[in-house]
Amino acid sequence: MIACFAAAGVWGTDYLTGSEPASDAARSPSATRVTVEAPETRELEDRFSAVGTILPNRSIDLRPLAAGRVVNAPATSGSQVAKGDLIFELDDRVARAELANAQASFDEARLQLQRFQELEERNVSAAAQIQTARAAFLRAEAALQLAKANLADRRLIAPFDGVLGTFDLDPGEYIEPATIVSTLADLSSVEAEFALPERYFAMTREGQTVRLEASPYPDRVFVGEVDFVSPGIEPASRSFDVRVLIENADRALAGGMFVDAQLVFDTYRALTVRDEAVISEGSANYVYTAVGDEARRTDVTLGSSRQGRTEIVEGLDESARVVVTGWDTLSDGSPIEIVPIEIAVEDASEEARQ
């Protein structure tokens, strides 16, 4: 009886205050709207990124091979030259005179040797005379070759196809063999040089594919292959040098240019999720997965991250439903409501406006 009155009193109080008894539904937390997505298996690459420097395939300093006064300089700064093209020419009058003198001495020594050889056949000439004439002939021949080389040194010829650097040589100018008149670089193909950590030494080999990007060409990817791997490790840096050969027919890459290089060691297939689904706290990495109407914290082991997706090494399979958006306020066991991505975007926009 007393219980009845007590109940009536509670009801009366609620009635007078205009309130109703709290229900179980009111006491339970509301479900969080989330979007989910199944992990995807994609082809990934095991690769390493490094900053490298472009080197011409061939590059030399151009110096005169003899001292002299310039009489002809047809080349210009930055011009493309072919192998055998004349770059500059020195006054060769003295060299030509020396060549003529050497040629005359050679002809004389050759005729003298021929006469002694003819006498020897008739047993008239002594062996000693033959040896003397032969020695004189050889000295004359050597002097002739030296004179020809000295004359050739008055002309600097391009040793290979390439592009000249700054070239400011004018006719009448006197230059010495120590004078660097320009540079010649072959840019038809170039090399990129960069260093890799010691741990990649056993994995790096000639012929591997390398992708490179240069800041002057933000929308272009250059492709090359490893053509040199240093045989040893640098003790100070614990790294080793690698060079990559890149075809450069349009001369887009220039010597000294920095490039971002990505060396591809291997390709493989792996499970991935969107980057935004992964939560990192210190050394722990986890995602939330949808199990029925609840969120479950799921620890994962991560691999590489490429193009907005992160590799999952352990912790998930393809049947999992991974929470991609809306996990900000979740904890293990939180009630969730799975909604399409369009609704989630609308909710986010509404919160931003508020």
Image (cartoon, rainbow, N blue to C red):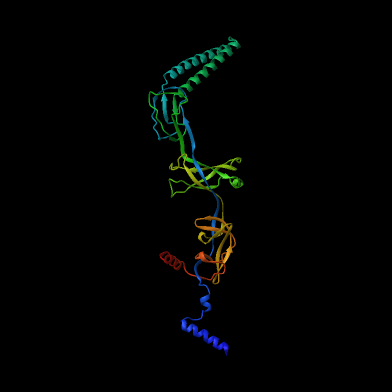
Residue 288, given in percent of the width and then of the height, sits at 55, 65
Residue 353, given in percent of the width and then of the height, sits at 40, 65
Quadrant location of the N terminus in the rendered image? bottom right
Q: Residue at the spot x=52%, y=75% of the render?
A: 27
Please tell me in which quadrant of the rendered image residue 250 appears. top left
- Does residue 292 lie above or below 148 as drawn? below
Q: Residue at the spot x=59%, y=13% of the render?
A: 131
Residue 94, given in percent of the width and then of the height, sits at 43, 18
| Nearer the observer, 214 or 138 | 214
**Res 316 seen here:** no
| Nearer the observer, 257 or 67 | 257
**Res 119 seen here:** yes
| Nearer the observer, 287 or 75 | 287
- Does residue 123 lie above or below 33 as drawn? above
Q: Residue at the spot x=52%, y=84% of the render?
A: 10
Quadrant location of the C terminus in the rendered image? bottom left
Which residue is situated farthest in the bottom direction here? 1
